[in-house]
Image: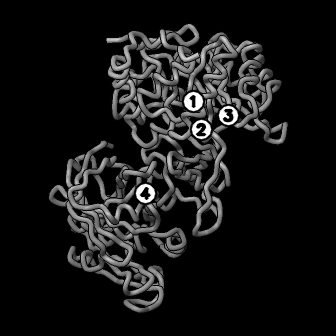
Amino acid sequence: MKQEILTVKSNDALTKSVYRLRLEGDLSSFTRPGQFCNIALPGFYLRRPISVCDIEDGVLTLLYKVVGHGTEAMADMMPGTKLDVLCGLGNGYDTEKSGPAPLLLGGGVGIPPLYGLAKALIAEGKQVRAILGFNTAEEIFWADEFRALGADVTVTTADGSAGVKGFVTDAMPDEYTYFYTCGPIPMLRAVYAKTVTSGQFSFEARMGCGFGACMGCSMKTADGGYKRVCREGPVFEKEEIVWES
Amino acid sequence: MGKLNVTLCGIEMDNPVIPASGTFGYGYEFAELYDINCLGTFSFKGTTKEPRYGNPLPRIAECKAGLINAIGLQNPGIDRVISEELPKLKEVFSKPVMANVGGFSVEEYVELCARLDREEQVGWLEVNISCPNVKAGGKSYGMTPEDAAEVTAAVKAVTTKPCIMKLTPNVTDIVSIAKACEDAGADGVSLINTLYGMRIDLKTGRPVIANRMGGYSGPAAFPIALRMVYQVRSAVKIPIVGIGGVSSAEDVVEMMYAGATAVGVGAANCIDPFASKKIIEDLPRVMEKYGIDSLESIIGGAQ
């Protein structure tokens, strides 16, 4: 982890509520796809943890959804704004376990970290299949970017207005060597139940600090212990997960 | 340069800044970022007899100026603190550490304090008496002078190192609790623990925190904590660790004028991992600005 001052290069809407924020600065502390950063926002006490979508040519791309006052304020940030950002947080996805044909399953704003992952897997010569789930056609974002990487992309919408009608688990292929997923909890549970291989899940949590100090985001694990989503996570292996009712 | 050192219960500290328990883990997350030997000391994560996961998620809620937490004393338990955490800490922190203990019965406090008292790295014991007393239906030991005195006398009977009782502000009269601790033999008191608070999510109409309520900490606690430190200072002779909303070197100086010998920094560590270090580095500037030659000389100066 490093504390950096990053500069807003651009900040624009992809859909009604999903924005793309591009930041410039020292990004050397990010080492794996699936890590996150924690952004201090003027006027808000806690930082906002946002997963990394992509790092390319010294630019950090974050895709975030406006869900509350903090992200509303983020949507108003102008190019040139300097931000205090904790960089290189969390464990990120492990690409070594993927096998030759990994499956990526993303739902809504759980999709962004899978993009950086897809890029890394494709660079390693793997055949990436991505299933991206949305509620409705007008909420679709970033599917073309996945296609441009060379991934085989299937879009699902809950209302059937585009792609396959239903959820990501309704469009799963029969064969894949491993899977990676990120999305809302009900989707993750469905993926957990339906997948036949091992895989990795990225979790979201309300965090205090984001770097392991406050224990605000600890999750119970299958060995009877616990791990901090911010520190040992946000990516957990399928075998570690305990679903709390 | 002015003198930053203070003596807390007979142990000299290079400066009065103490990252507060629960905001600094067992130190090594921060030691990856900077040399934590710059701290006066720090109070490690509240330790209980058994390992504890704590409360269900979510257990953090943001506030306008601060946060509410309901972690519920997550910690690996005393056995692993002694066998794993303290050896790891030794590699990155060479000063005496403040060992924070939480208990759910007097017997538990006694066992924890007796065991940590024997650990060479431990300088002080900080006894969190804001924990619920299971036998008394969850009412905390820090809520009545009698219960606070009972825990104090019990832990003093089995320890040789200074015992600092950590007080809850969620009481009618914190001064009477502090006096009871002093009378029962406490070497110091630290105050304040978090203030009971809650937030409600307007989208669901339900409390944000799964446990419904939690403890508020952050800058809005500062004037309340300062007032309580000031009142306690006027009533007891034992040293005070002043805690509550401290976010700057100016706050440290103000807390010391009110009567604190050392000053805890809590929530600030959660929003800036370098907060305690920055505060220490800024103290000489603030001292010079206000013509303070020695921090020790201003303790209780506002009385």
- Rendered residue at 69%/16% (across/down): B235
The secondary structure type at the circle numbered 4 is strand
The residue that label 3 is drawn on is: B169
Callouts 4 and 3 in the same chain: no
The answer to whether the residues at label 4 and label 2 have Cβ atoms under 8 Å apart is no
Give the quadrant of residue A51: bottom left
Subunit ID for the residue under disc 1: B
Left or right relative to A69: residue B200: right
The residue that label 2 is drawn on is: B75
Which disc, if any, is residue A173? none
Viewer-side label of 2, 1? 2
Amino acid type, callout 3: Pro
Subunit ID for the residue under disc 4: A
The residue that label 1 is drawn on is: B81
How far, Cα to Cα, is label 3 from label 1?
28 Å
The residue that label 4 is drawn on is: A235
The answer to whether the residues at label 4 and label 3 have Cβ atoms under 8 Å apart is no
Where's the C terminus of chain B, which quadrant? top right
How far, Cα to Cα, is label 4 from label 2?
22 Å
Callouts 3 and 1 in the same chain: yes
